Image: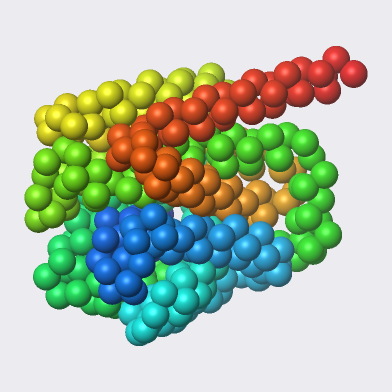
Amino acid sequence: MSFLSMSVPTGQSTRLFAAVLTLAIGGLFIGTGEFATMSLLPMLADATQVSIPVAGQYISAYAIGVVVGAPAIAVLGARASRKTLLLVLLLMVILGYAASAAAWSYSSLLLFRFLSGLPHGAWYGVAGLTAAMMVPASRRTQFIGYVMLGLAAANVAGVPAMTWLGQHMGWRTAFVFVSLGAVLTAVMVMLFVPATPGNKNASPLTELSALANPQVWLTLAVASVGFGGMLAVYSYITPTLTELSGFSLAQVPGVLILWGIGMVCGNILGGWMADRALVPAIFIMLVWNVLCLMLFALVAEWKWAVMLALFLLGNGFALVPALQSRLMSVASNAQTLAASLNHSAFNISNAIGASLGGFAIAAGAGWASTGWVGAALAAGGILFMCSSVLCAKGGKNE
């Protein structure tokens, strides 16, 4: 069954469509909260009376929350019903964003952004795993990709909407928007997601056993370093577009839609490629990111050229479902932990990208320097993927 056939579903397909749509919508709101914080960064910096590079720590704090929360929740909730776990995660999102909206200082907002990040990785991991369990193995990556379309769509609709709200009604309203979106998603989960039982044989030790596999660590390294390039650029995209490219602040949400459209296209194509040749697809996506990040650095001062570069960069999001599928393949019985760790790794990349991009800007290298930082990180991801392949071949030879 193709995604196209899901658009006019009947019977069992209707239930599958409703469940996957619900999981994607949850990803839309959670992804909106993550990425829109980057576009709201100048407002957050002004409200808490810090510089933009210092305000970049709000992004890093959220990312650290993801890194801590994803494995901890995955290990503790491995035996829980997937549906129950999804509802608990949404409750954490609701509380985290409500608290962020009420923040009164730099330190309080930093804390609440950390708390908001705790359920992020576990949500995408458990949601992707839930979708993958609904279909044959040959369609697994595509359905993980369909769930991840919510994260991609966040950059088409959610981020521009939240950015607009922040600009016209204040950044607090933007955080409330995400909290209310999580409430809507919770209602949909109760109505449409089947009550799938947890793995009764799972245990913290079983889940943690995945960490003894070097392929798990190498795949996580690909995500942590290789994807950091995109986040180095995106973390500072609003000041780059306004200070260097010449866009007005009001035009930024519209420009960011191009990034989101690129993410949607890349997500669909990436899932299709990965189900046919997983490792080659990952290499292709990493090389693509290196080239597109270099392009961004070269053309950032020209409006039309940077718009094209942002669309092409968005395509690199295809790496997300592909690496999640690879982690699930190499993690054996620790599926919940593996699926969640993927998003911990991507948020390590978030922290790395935001920090290194901020260092480059603070050092006087200019807004476009984030593209060069990003290209170097993507190249590092290629090296880790080469190590993973060589390690796998070495294991077979033994």
Q: Could you tell whether 282 is left or right of 332 in the image?
A: left
Q: Could you tell whether 225 is left or right of 353 in the image?
A: right
Instruction: Pinpoint residue 291: horizontal percent, then vertical percent.
Output: 38, 21
Most extreme residue toward the front is: 364
Residue 266 position (above or below residue 30): above
- Residue 202 or residue 19, whichever sits in front: 202
Residue 44 appears in view: no
Q: Measuring 74% from the left and 43% from the top, which residue is drawn there?
A: 332
- Quadrant where the C terminus sits is top right
**What kind of colouring is applied to the model shown?**
rainbow
Count of numbered tags: 0
Residue 62 appears in view: yes
Q: Could you tell whether 71 is left or right of 147 in the image?
A: right
- Residue 334 or residue 70, whichever sits in front: 70
Q: Measuring 75% from the left and 65% from the top, which residue is drawn there?
A: 200
Q: Measuring 76% from the left and 23% from the top, which residue is drawn there?
A: 391
Most extreme residue toward the right is: 398
Q: Measuring 77% from the left and 36% from the top, which residue is drawn there?
A: 214
Instruction: Pinpoint residue 222: horizontal percent, then vertical percent.
Output: 59, 34
Instruction: Pinpoint residue 201: horizontal percent, then vertical percent.
Output: 79, 61
- Quadrant where the N terminus sits is top left
Residue 154 position (above or below residue 94): above
Instruction: Pinpoint residue 308: horizontal percent, then vertical percent.
Output: 20, 29
Residue 88 position (above or below residue 360): below
Q: Could you tell whether 207 is left or right of 121 in the image?
A: right
